Amino acid sequence: MKIESKFHGLPGDDNGLDCRWFERLTEFQKSMTLRQVEFKNTNWPELKDKYGEFAKRRGYYYPHILPAGHLEKNFYTGIYNDVQHYLRDKDIELHTEALNLLSSQVCCFNFLFPLKKDLEKASRVLQPVLPEVDKVLDIEFEYTGPESTTMWLGEPPSGKRGQNRTSIDAAVWWLDRKELKKLTLIEWKFTEKSFGTCGGYSSNGNTNRRKCHNLRVQSINPEQDCYVASGKDDRTTRRYWEHLTKAGISLERFGEHQGCPFIGPFYQLMRQYLLAAHCRDCIKDIQAVDVVVIAFQGNRNFLRVPRHLRHLGNNIVAAWNNLLTTAPPLRLVFAEELMANAEQDSWAKYILNRYVTLEILEDKWTH
């Protein structure tokens, strides 16, 4: 089947390419797209007019996606080969959008992988994420928990880290000043407009989505009412509902809410809190496990709460925390806060040049 090529440009470019896609972006996405294109054109002028293919839609090309064969350019200098070895050794799936200069996974690697290689630096930079940190012990990426997690969650045994399993973008093992060993799970947000949604709801196999809208959480029978828990095949054997209380998530606080509350952004947070709960139970030398979101100050869209859940809070973090009983609250830390603790080395300058606005660091970096 022939696939029609379609090139997309940026407003103001004198090339006659389709620019309508750009107007559909949020303001933060627009500013960061322009920033990444400028980064590409400045560092690799030979690629200025070469656009990469959108992995999710073949035949469509965009200026902020690198052409095939140039993946190394999307990573901070010196870490590409180490990242590739790490992915192979840990059997981690690199996202299909890794050539996209807006890739959240690559952004996370660019920030945190150099810290994995220098744990002393990690202890300084990650202070806003790790209260009372004394020493960072290790950093893992696309972490899926102990081996027993897959069966406990009812997820496909054929999955891998970063694919078809509940994976957290990064996991940090650390000691606090009392020498208590802790684990912090990090969800990394770059230009995303929201947290992920339930794939079961939008699945082609879900032929009766009315069940999702009519479901009542106070009287749910998961195998009958929830597609992902119906037990028809490997994709629909999830055991999420039965572990919510264990994870410190209260269904009672939804009140008489009609419809599955996990169709939207709570779905991803729910899975991460289930992962945290299992780590808490199964990793014996860990004293505490919590979840942190690292995002960018300019991106406020992902904090929006769907209308039907706004009675819980005016942003997604506050709303989610209102559901928690015994679990530690979700915390939000901005990437800019991390850089406030960074030394003026080549890595920090790269991050500032590519991702972070300098305003928060003006006092420190101009004297």
Image (spheres, rainbow, N blue to C red):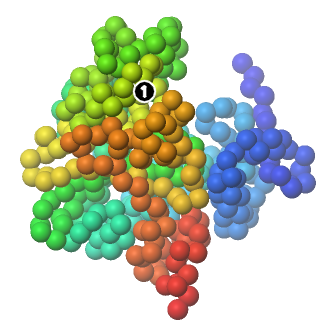
**Relative to 129, 178 lies left or right:** left
Q: Residue at x 57, y 54 (%)?
A: 299
| Disc 1 element | loop
- Is residue 138 placed above or below 119 in the rendered structure? above
What is the three-letter code of the residue carrying label 1? Pro
Report the number of numbered marks: 1
Near-viewer residue (136 or 201): 201
x and y percentages locating residue 323 in the rendered image: 33, 37
What residue is disc 1 on? Answer: 261
Q: Residue at x 60, y 53 (%)?
A: 101
Q: Is residue 187 visible?
A: yes
| The image quarter in which residue 35 lies | bottom right
**Relative to 304, 133 lies left or right:** left
Q: Residue at x 58, y 75 (%)?
A: 359
Q: Residue at x 25, y 48 (%)?
A: 328
| The image quarter in which residue 342 lies | bottom left
**Relative to 220, 79 lies left or right:** right
x and y percentages locating residue 106 in the rendered image: 49, 53
The image quadrant where one finds the N terminus is top right
- Which residue occupies the extreme bottom position in the image? 367
x and y percentages locating residue 43 in the rendered image: 66, 67
**Relative to 43, 337 lies left or right:** left
Q: Is residue 77 visible?
A: no
- Is residue 341 placed above or below 202 in the rendered structure? below
- Is residue 146 placed above or below 239 in the rendered structure? below
Q: Residues within 10 Å of mark 1 (few under 14, many from 20)?
A: many
Near-viewer residue (172 or 345): 172
- Is residue 125 placed above or below 82 in the rendered structure? below
x and y percentages locating residue 63 in the rendered image: 72, 50
